[in-house]
Image: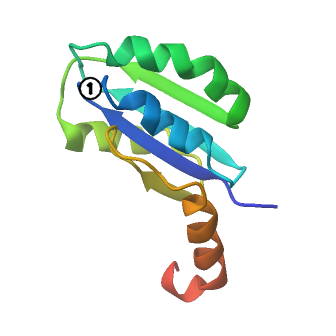
Amino acid sequence: MQPLVSIVIPCYNHDCFIEDTIQSVIDQTYERIELIIIDDGSIDLSVAKIKAMLPICQKRFESVYFTTRPNKGVCATLNEALTHCHGKYVSFIASDDLMLPQKTFIQVKYLENHADITG
């Protein structure tokens, strides 16, 4: 069985990009993914756009965690996200970036075949 991968998206005022970022995670060829999204106090339409995509995320991923709260900064947001991760591996993606479709598959395959670098 494939190991679970936790993909974390911290978001702050990226309403122009967040849908494409989430879609790039949905489009991963790797199956076993949990998605963690924390909105760090955005004042644009980021939260509304994330919420609109949650139903498709819940169908695609093993689990989905989303929250929004007052701005604490990226370090606090990433540390908070880590407390919600259950995967063997964690992958971070900024809310204005994209993942190529095979990124997670390639990385997990490499890490699983090279235990000497992960242990």
* Residue at 24 percent of width and 14 percent of height: 44
Image height of 91 relative to 70, above or below: below
Could you say where residue 75 lies in the image, as x and y percent from the top left?
21, 44
Image height of 3 relative to 83, above or below: below
* Residue at 60 percent of width and 69 percent of height: 106
* Mark 1: amino acid: Asp
Considering the numbered disc 1 on the image, is that residue within a helix, a strand or a loop? loop
Image height of 106 relative to 101, above or below: below
Could you say where residue 117 lies in the image, as x and y percent from the top left?
49, 84
The residue most toward the right is 1
Residue at mark 1: 40
Image height of 107 relative to 104, above or below: below
Residue 85 lies left or right of residue 46; in this view the side is: right
Residue 83 lies left or right of residue 63; in this view the side is: left
Residue 45 quadrant: top left
Could you say where residue 21 lies in the image, as x and y percent from the top left?
43, 38
* Residue at 54 percent of width and 61 percent of height: 103
Image mark count = 1
In the image, 76 versus 96, the foreground residue is 96
Please tell me how crowded label 1 is: few (under 14), some (14-19), or many (20+) other residues with Cα within 10 Å. Answer: many
In the image, 69 versus 108, the foreground residue is 108
Q: Which colour scheme appears in the figure?
A: rainbow
In the image, 96 versus 82, the foreground residue is 96
- On-image quarter of the N terminus: bottom right
Could you say where residue 70 lies in the image, as x and y percent from the top left?
22, 17
Residue 77 quadrant: top left
Residue 43 lies left or right of residue 9; in this view the side is: left
